[in-house]
């Protein structure tokens, strides 16, 4: 089975996003990552009303990469914003 590094982008809608630091989100993302996620690199940007996770993952295909990225972002957000209203707006993956 061949694997490729995929760049994924997950946008989380979070009304009070500005209350979260990129450093704290990155730290929790690292803690939330399992070996099966095959996370290689992460870039996180907090914007007004949203958080954008750009993750580089090793995966078999785009669908697998997007699935792992979204699950990892959901685990991260559940840990840092459990009492806040947030939702996944979109997840995309490309080579």
Image (cartoon, grey):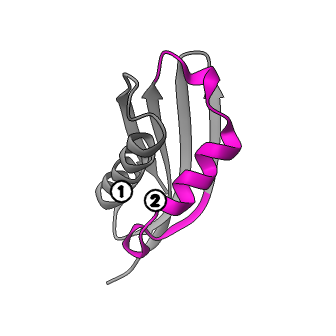
Residue 21 marker: none
Residue 62 marker: 1
**Residue appearing at x 40%, y 42% in the figure:** 92
* Residue picked out by circle 2: 32
**Which region shows up in magenta?**
14-41
Determine if the magenta segment contains residue 35: yes
Q: Return the disc, 2 or 1, that comes first in the chain's sequence.
A: 2
Residue 86 location (% of width, % of height): 38, 26
Dot 1 alpha-carbon crowd within 10 angstroms: few under 14, some 14 to 19, many 20 or more: many
Q: Do the residues labelled 2 and 1 touch (CB within 8 Å)?
A: no
**Residue appearing at x 65%, y 34% in the figure:** 45
Q: In this view, does 24 lie to the left or right of 54?
A: right
- Quarter of the image with the N terminus is bottom left
Q: Is residue 70 left or right of residue 15?
A: left
* CA gap, disc 2 and disc 1: 21 Å
Residue 13 location (% of width, % of height): 44, 23
Q: Which type of secondary structure does the marked residue at label 2 adopt?
A: helix
Residue 15 location (% of width, % of height): 48, 15
What kind of secondary structure does the magenta stretch mostly adopt? Answer: helix
Q: Viewer-nearest of labels 2 and 1?
A: 2
Residue 11 location (% of width, % of height): 46, 32
């Amino acid at each position: 089975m061949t694997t490729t590094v995929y760049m994924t982008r997950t946008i989380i809608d979070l009304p009070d996003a500005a209350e979260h630091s990129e450093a704290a989100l990155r730290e929790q993302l690292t803690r939330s990552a399992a070996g099966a996620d095959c996370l290689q690199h992460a870039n996180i940007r907090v914007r007004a009303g949203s958080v954008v996770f750009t993750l580089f993952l090793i995966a078999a295909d785009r669908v697998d990469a997007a699935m792992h990225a979204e699950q990892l972002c959901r685990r991260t957000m559940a840990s840092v914003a459990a009492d806040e209203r947030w939702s996944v707006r979109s997840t995309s993956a490309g080579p």
